[in-house]
Amino acid sequence: MSFEWVVKIISNNGPMFIRGAGVTLFISMIGTILGSIIGLLIGVVRTIPMPERGAKRIILKVINAILSAYIEFFRGTPMIVQAMVIYYGSALAFGIDMNRLVAAVFIVSINTGAYMAEIVRGGIVSIDKGQFEAAHAIGMNHIQTMTNVVLPQVIRNILPATGNEFVINIKDTSVLNVIAVTELFFQTKSIAGNNFRYFESFFVACILYFIMTFTITRILRAIEKKLDGPDNYNMIGNQMQVERPEDMLRRTKNSGQGHA
């Protein structure tokens, strides 16, 4: 590898690298946010208690079957294949000419939603059943229980997994070059095709991917630490305070003098 070539590639193609990294961050961020919302909604629906009989039971079973099929399909197929099917398939089957950036966000969102749905479901199941029973005992329905009691805890518990999905999406957006989305990999391939310095060009892309994933990981860890609160808590107000030994001795002496 020639260091001079790396510097030359950066100086000549810096704006293309930056644009590609910006598109990668935009797609992965919006896709992760929308996918997390999809996952939360599916997780809530899939944990609705099943009625013993009646039309509600049938409807709920049908909905659960559809959601299960969605999750299994998008978790069981590569994103690169999903991109080809959704982008080109929508044009052939329905005549929809999708904007490439919109298609990219849509693909990443529904793919992330399938994974987040299982993460959210696992987070909901991990909550102690006594909290559900207590919420139902005071008259809350399933939606109120989820909104006020369960989901605040679930969101905190799944934050590391959500951050991991974000990092994975930053890397996986590279497969979207098959539908000509101008993310970082696509831009790097174009740069390397112009200068024929593939190693140096993709080395720069590698460094940019690392900077993005490393920075996002550190930011998310800082948020997790902030949500955890301080390690030590000071007892204030009318809370019980531990009496120091010297204060206890002084109080004993004063009490003895008073009795004398």
Image: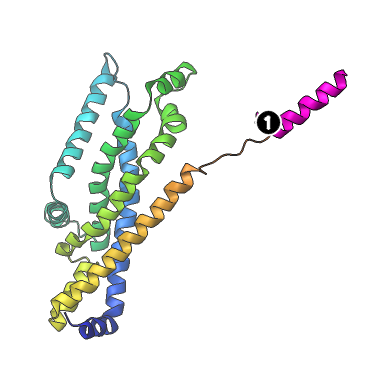
Above or below — where is 97 with respect to 233? below
Q: Would residue 249 appear left or right of 177 to someone viewing this image?
A: right
Residue farthest to the top?
53
* Residue 256 is covered by the magenta coloring: yes
Q: Percent x, y for residue 249? A: 74, 29
Q: Which amino acid does label 1 sit on?
A: Glu
In the displayed structure, 172 sits above or below 205; it is above
Q: Residue at x 41, y 20 (%)?
A: 130
Nearer-the-camera pick, 78 or 212: 212
Does residue 129 appear to the left or right of 90 in the view shown? Answer: right
Q: Main secondary structure of the magenta part?
A: helix
Look at the image and say whether residue 51 sits in the magenta stretch: no
Residue 3 quadrant: bottom left
Task: State the image coordinates of residue 131 (x, y, percent, origin top left).
Answer: 43, 23
What is the quadrant of residue 24 in the picture?
bottom left
Question: Can you say whether 222 is above or below 247 in the image?
Answer: below
* Residue appearing at x 21%, y 27% in the figure: 62
- Magenta extent: 240-260
**Residue 182 in view:** no
Give x and y (percent) for residue 183: 24, 66
- What's the residue at 28%, 30% (across, down)? 46
For label 1, the residue is 243
In the image, 198 versus 17, the foreground residue is 198
Would you call the spot at circle 1 few (<14 residues within 10 Å), some (14-19), or many (20 or more)?
few
Q: State whether residue 5 appears in this view.
A: yes
